[in-house]
Image (spheres, rainbow, N blue to C red):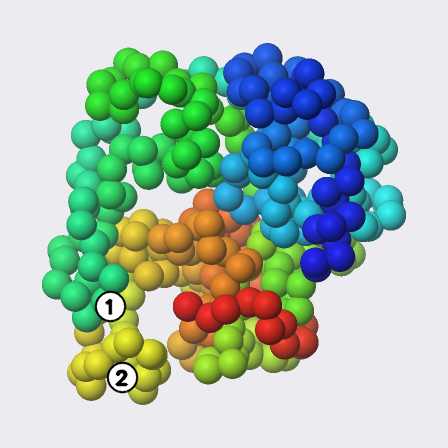
Amino acid sequence: MIRLLVVAAAFLLACGGAEAAKLDLAAVNQAKFASYTPKGFNPAVLKAQILLDRARFSPGLIDGHLGESFTKAVSAFQTANGFQSDGQLTRETWDKLLATSASPVLIAYELTRKDVRGPFTKRIPARLERMARLSRLDYHNAAEKLAERFHISEPLLQRLNPGIGLRKAGTKLWVPDIGRGDPPAIAEVEVDKEARVLRALDPSGNVLAVYPASIGSDEKPAPSGQAEVKRVVHNPTYHYDPHFAFKGVKTKQPFTIAAGPNNPVGSIWIDLSIESYGIHGTPEPGKIGKTFSHGCIRLTNWDAEDLASMVQKGTKVTFKDEIADAGVKPI
């Protein structure tokens, strides 16, 4: 994966050469391919991330920067289209990506009353036992809520809308157009432990969606072999069993943490036929693919929700064996 990331760095950009850090509507929507090594924020990387997200080759958290999840998404898109799969955003890959959608990647959005009124949970403790005291684990504020809705980081949301407050309905913002269209019918979910990605496949084995994932740990590895989807739970609560013996949890008694997008399993739980294992969301989308999980398969909330719209009871889930990666730290 490190090699792919290095290769991807020799790649592209747009709109003014060295002045790549400029960010406005035209800089992103009109970004062009060029042979360029980007540093820091890059409008063309942002455009590519949004297009990949739309095509269901998820780059994870959209932030306008090169990163491992972006490289994986480019590589998966290349494989699906019969290109050399090296993670480098070549002219051929760029042109094919543009051909997936003609609409602008940034669009205007008007805040609604629902966006700004909450309810919000301003303070959420780090320890699980203390989380269990809360009646709800909502978003901290409107910025977090909107950033997750549009699959972007909060700093990027602010950068797209400098000086604009998020407290009044009717306020206009610039946001990514991340509409993915109707969910496809899938036959199988493939969990690739070594690559740290989850793939949705059609009956012929063709890839319909790819999501970055945090998958198990040395302390509690993900399972091997095959499982099936038992059910999908929207807005789940989280039940802690003392037998899990997670680091940092001192109580010997079971407890339940209330529902909400900042719940430890996020906004979706896809229950598997292997007891206590599932595919679920997360309150920390920026860590997906960069850290281990407590055995389950963790996606961003929006990718978990997208996958949940495709699976049904009995959908096969296949686990591909992993090779340990010392560069990833458990949480």
**What percent of the width, then of the height, locates residue 171?**
30, 15
Spot occupied by residue 34 in the image (x, y as percentages of width and height): 79, 25
Q: Evaluate if marks 2 and 1 touch, with contact meaning CB atoms under 8 Å apart.
A: no
Secondary structure under tag 1 reads: helix
Q: CA distance from mark 2 to mark 1?
A: 12 Å
Q: Is residue 112 above or below residue 78?
A: above
Q: What residue is at 22 percent from the left and 23 percent from the top?
A: 167
Which quadrant holds residue 142?
top left
Q: Nearer the viewer, residue 24 or 114?
A: 24
Tell me the quarter of the picture where residue 100 sits. top right
Q: Nearer the viewer, residue 131 or 89?
A: 89
- Location of the N terminus by quadrant is bottom right
For label 1, the crowd category at 10 Å Cα-Cα, with few meaning under 14, some 14 to 19 and many 20 or more, is many
Give the side of residue 284 with respect to residue 23, left or right.
Answer: left
Q: Residues within 10 Å of mark 2 (few under 14, many from 20)?
A: some
Q: What residue type is disc 1 on?
A: Leu
Residue holding disc 1: 128
Nearest the viewer among 146 and 103 is 146
Q: Is residue 309 visible?
A: no
Percent position of residue 199, x then y: 64, 57
Residue drawn at the location 47% of the way across and 55% of the way down: 287
